[in-house]
Amino acid sequence: MHSFLLLVLWAALGLTSSNIHQHHIETLMDNALVLRVPDSVGSMVEVPLTCGAAYQPHEVFWKKNGEELTPAVQGNHITVLVKEMKAGNYSCHLTSTGEYLNHTLILVQLDPDNRTVILEEKSPQEGHIHCSALNYNGSFHCNWKKTQQRSHATVLLIKASRYQEEISCVLDADGSGVLCQDVECPYKEEKHPIHLTIYMISHFRLEAYTKSFYLREIVRPEKLPNLHITSGQVFRWDYPDTWEKPQTYFGLHFQVKVLQSGQSCNSDNFILNNLTEETVFDVNIKSKKYVFCVRAQDKHARGPWSHWSQCM
């Protein structure tokens, strides 16, 4: 019986220790560690923390999310046990005054499948992030939408690069998008795609959202300006001011639709539907009441169409 109890105890201790993962700890950035766990249920990770070599002579104590640990934890080098998704911000302080010295933010990410609950998926093809550019000058904007349950989530880190060159990005004021600028020559042939990663956190849960694309795949011309009717039923419009020049090199072609009065430009119930490379179109129909719609697309890269411009 005694041997049996020892065997059961040994098995229980072995099971507990098997749930403790130490090799899934990675440094994401300064003062931020990521625990990559296969499942949020039952996972336990032992995390070594240090206040820093500069504070080695001092006696320090630790807080988690601004609250003192119970029981109190002291020492420059400590180990904390993170269970499931219950990570946090661990800070060290001078014992005598409580003065802040340093901190380590511990985050948990489900791995390897990176299950996501923070951002809404725009579509299976597009994923969670939508990116667009007005031209080929290297500037592009990406946006996303948080789920209603995770509306409090914030962006922790943005990484953007092309091949081995980093791309500078600035987060939108409301945290729902980012504006980036690729300083490499925008007019040369794109041999390598742009890679973008957005790191979102919600209650110390980390999710990484990635997107890879070529600039030519996301360039969407602005709505065509100055759409007007001249003599008879001849319509004219201009290239967008933001489009690249010369137009002979950065050419657009245009989709023209004529629909019955009251119809939407997106309707398939059209009277006329043509493609043209000219900025003028003669509507040769008998009807006196109709809707004229026109939009533009890079005629070489065949990227996204601009939004419709219309005249009734």
Image: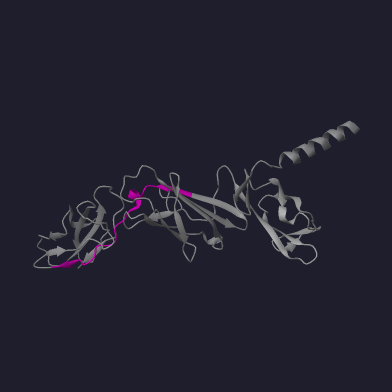
Magenta residues span 210-229
Location of the N terminus by quadrant is: top right
The structure residue drawn at horizontal position 20% and vertical position 66%, both measured from the top left corner, is: 227
Residue 1 visible, this orientation: no
In the visual, does 30 lie left or right of 134? right
Query: Can you give x and y, in whole percent of width and height, for residue 32 in the image?
Result: 62, 53
Q: Is residue 47 above or below residue 279?
A: above
Name the image quarter holding residue 5: top right
Is residue 194 shown left or right of residue 285? right
Q: How is the image coloured?
A: one colour
Question: Residue 60, how many percent across, how many down?
Answer: 77, 58
Q: Nearer the viewer, residue 212 or 203?
A: 212
Q: Is residue 96 visible?
A: yes
Residue drawn at 9 percent across, 62 percent down:
286
Q: Is residue 220 magenta?
A: yes
Position in image of residue 162 (x %, y %): 42, 47
Magenta-drawn stretch contains 64: no
Nearest the viewer among 30 and 21 is 30
Q: Residue at x 17, y 68 (%)?
A: 228
